Image: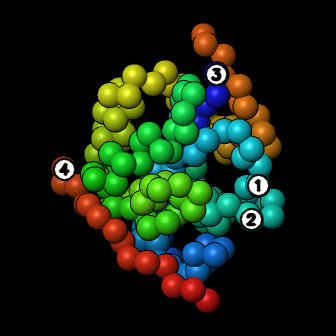
């Protein structure tokens, strides 16, 4: 059984962030959810930035890591539904698939988490949520850990605008 992860992050202040090949873009203060797959995930905080998410993780606080069991790419299962309900950052983390994005934004954490829980339930995914030491768990994931998981208000919608090239 393979798995995926969902990072729930807070960016304490709005700021411009350079995101590799996507260029520079403004990321508003608020909450972000990023969906990814566990296998092959290596770089992250304190490492050479390679993946789009690495650039945001350097600036945001990881509040929660949700681990999901699935044989499919978690991000491609959740992204279509989330992009209809939350603001998305075009092309973020999705250069290897047809998804609009794998990163979503909302200024209302409670509403964002409620929408996320609804979509996870609809997909029938088994999850584990980790709020204690989420940065340590993220470090473990980016180092290739969890490559195998045992069986045991008002919505803002649409695209936040394109990031500009440097």
The spot of residue 35 in percent (x, y) is 52, 46
Of the residues tagged 4 and 3, which is closer to the observer? 3
Comes first in the chain, label 3 or label 1: 3
Contact between labelled residues 4 and 2, with CB atoms less than 8 Å apart: no
The percent coordinates of residue 105 (x first, y second) are 39, 59
Q: Nearer the viewer, residue 113 or 84?
A: 84
Q: Position of residue 116 (x, y in %)?
A: 36, 39
CA gap, disc 4 to disc 3?
36 Å
Residue at left 42%, top 60%? 100
| Rendered view: 135 above or below 54 | above
Q: Which residue is mark 4?
A: 153
* Residues at circles 3 and 1 in contact by the CB criterion of under 8 Å: no
> Dot 1 corresponds to which residue?
43
Q: Which of these two is toward me, 72 or 110?
A: 72
Q: Residues within 10 Å of mark 4 (few under 14, many from 20)?
A: few
N-terminal of the two: label 2 or label 3? 3
Residue ID at (52%, 38%): 74
What is the spatial separation of the Cα atoms under label 2 and label 1, in whole angstroms? Answer: 6 Å
Where the N terminus falls, by quadrant? top right
| Residues under numbered marks 2 and 1 in contact, where contact means CB atoms less than 8 Å apart | yes
Q: Residue at x 64, y 28 (%)?
A: 2
Q: Earlier in the sequence, mark 4 or mark 3?
A: 3
Q: Which residue is mark 2?
A: 49
Which of labels 2 and 4 is toward the front?
2
Q: Up-down: is 146 above or below 95?
A: above
Residue denoted by label 3: 1
**In the displayed structure, would residue 91 be above or below residue 24?**
above
């Amino acid at each position: 059984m393979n798995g995926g992860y969902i990072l729930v992050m807070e960016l304490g202040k709005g700021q411009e962030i350079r995101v590799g090949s996507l260029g520079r873009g403004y990321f508003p203060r608020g909450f972000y959810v990023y969906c990814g797959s566990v296998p092959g995930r290596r770089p992250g905080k304190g490492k050479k930035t390679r993946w789009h998410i690495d650039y945001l993780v350097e600036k945001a606080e990881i509040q929660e890591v949700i681990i999901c069991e699935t044989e499919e790419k978690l991000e491609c299962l959740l992204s279509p539904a989330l992009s209809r309900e939350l603001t998305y950052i075009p092309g973020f983390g999705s250069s290897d698939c047809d998804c609009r994005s794998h990163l979503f934004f909302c200024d209302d954490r409670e509403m964002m988490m409620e929408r996320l829980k609804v979509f996870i339930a609809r997909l029938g995914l088994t999850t584990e949520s980790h709020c204690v030491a989420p940065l340590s768990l993220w470090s473990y994931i980016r180092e290739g850990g969890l490559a195998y998981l045992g069986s045991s208000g008002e919505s803002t919608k649409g695209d936040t605008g394109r990031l500009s090239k440097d």
